Amino acid sequence: MAEDGRERAEDAAETTKKAKQGGFRTMPFILANDFCDRLATVGFGSNLISYLTLQLHLPLVEASNVLTNYHGTTNLTPLVGGLIADSFAGRFWTITVGSIIYQLGMVCLTLSAALPSLRPPPCAKHAAECQRASTYQIAILYLSLLCTSIGAGGSRPCNMAFGADQLELGARRRRSANGGKAPMWSFFNLYFFGIELAKLTAVTVVVYIQENVGWGWGLGVPTIAMFVAVIGFVSGYSLYVKMPPGGSPLVRLAQVVAAAFKKRKTVLPDPDLLYEDKKLDAGISTTGRLLHTNQLKFFDKAAIVTEGDVLPSGEPKLWRLSTVHRVEEIKSIIRMLPIWAAGILMVTASSHNSSFAIQQARTMDRDITRSFKIPPASMLIFTNLAMLITLAFYDRVLVRVLRRFTGRPNGITHLQRAGVGMTIAMLANVAAAAVETRRKSVAAASGMLDAPKGATLPISVFWLVPQYAIHGIADAFMDVGRMEFLYDQAPESMRSTAAALYWLTISAGSYLGTLLVTIVHEKTRASGQWLQDNLNRGKLDNYYWLVVGLQGLNLVYYFVCVKYYTFKPLETEVEHQPGHGNGTESAKKGVSYK
């Protein structure tokens, strides 16, 4: 009896300890880490085009491609980091190690900017030719960028999923401990709001330091901030809900494919006869098992029980037999991919904001006062401000209004929110094309089509505000909607990997931007290049109109994908009604998460 009492007391203490973990109090540690990550990335990346052209003296097209390739690599590595976290490392340790590697990359970047030997000598004023960076200097830059890319691969896919875990799993534990209800915060709105604050700080304070104090200090400030964030994140270790990794999701997916292929000639039985094993799936289905769907029926064959599929101990041979839950995992991922792919072109469509648009701004009148000019890269402030205002308005006002008409807690579905953002994004590039046409007409009227570098056209830089602001409004709908969709519709054990898909969209979009710029540059060479170092003689407005056309086609594709998308159904727990026993039981009740 005494032994049983002690065990119950230990279990109660452990339950109380877990109930105190997670929740909103963990947000400062998690969001501060990502804040400084983005401060460092945006503080350098937003002005990287200026560093490459003005400090390393690279041609505009080459510098633009370096920029998009860097963004592509930085947003490709999260796929590897997400798989590592979901497979064996867990999200906490993946974030920690990734942040440390990122810190090393930032130190190298700061040194490369601060030491004169790692960049070419300054260009003489109004010089026609400048000495470009040597192969050695470019190699040092690439090594630094590679370290930051690898580090971002550890932190980016896990920060969002780890933060959402603190609120979702923490709330569930508190409900279990006290029988009450815990509030579920709008985490993804909060997350992106914090990210936009970091971007806002980067394109104002950090860019100002880079332009007016020096690149050494301009990179040193976010490097120091990143160091403080890493220390702060690790110090919150005891407060976090740490969901154990459920084993390699790629292995499970491969097992389903292998088992389905082996049984490809087997006739499918009634869905109720397919193999299920609640104990086997317990570690990868704490929020509920996935229920059978009628799509992609080929994979259902992996759950057909045939002779030799089960060991004498009763355990299945996983390369021959999979549970319905594991089959539905791969179905969920496959169903998500067409909608995921629609986001790629959206990234391509906005990639010029950190390259061509900044070069446009550099040719325009940037005077705020007689002694202060707004740095070209700081024009991104209008994107950040528009997104911050839109996020706050959406979360505090618009959702409540929409809820009255739709009856949905979030007002509209994740996919509808993303679709609205994609539609608004088209307007941003329409504005960009119109403003570039206006800018060139001013250059022609002023006789400045062949003005030397550094010359200022008599047109205000604030003509660029509409395109930047509309992009910010679009991102508030599109980015949050896509991230909510990926987190919500991904299998529970693959949420870090799903978050990595968000970054993979940015990676693919960046690489596609490089490809599009390269193709346009080559194909228009004979008829008058659209993309020239001298923007006044180029046809950048034609490039913007081309992007608008591609966005229109992509939007039609997206709506078709949404129309035929099937939301994942989950097995939920329902309470017994009075007179039918106590406690709860599992019920095969499908819930479509939208």
Image: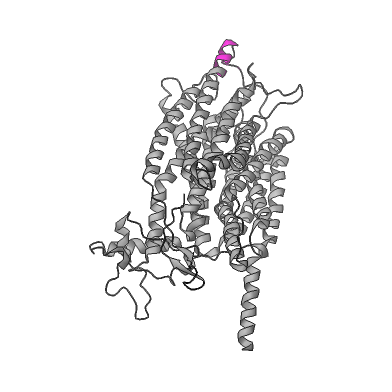
Q: Is residue 547 left or right of residue 400?
A: left
Relative depth, front residue between 178 and 59: 178
Residue bounds of the magenta highlight = 439-452
**Residue at position x 32%, y 56% from top?**
294
Q: Position of residue 372 (x, y in %)?
A: 74, 26
Left or right of 461 in this view: 77: left
Percent position of residue 242, x then y? 59, 64
Residue 231 x/y as whole percent? 70, 57
Residue 206 shown left or right of residue 167 in the figure: right
Residue lying furthest front in this view? 579
At which x and y percent is residue 451?
A: 60, 17
Residue under the image location 64 percent in, 58 percent down: 23
Q: Is residue 592 above or below residue 70?
A: below
Nearer to the camera, 60 or 582: 582
Is 208 drawn above or below residue 35 in the view shown?
above
Task: Check residue 419 for magenta coloring.
Answer: no
Asked if residue 525 can be seen in this view, the reply is yes
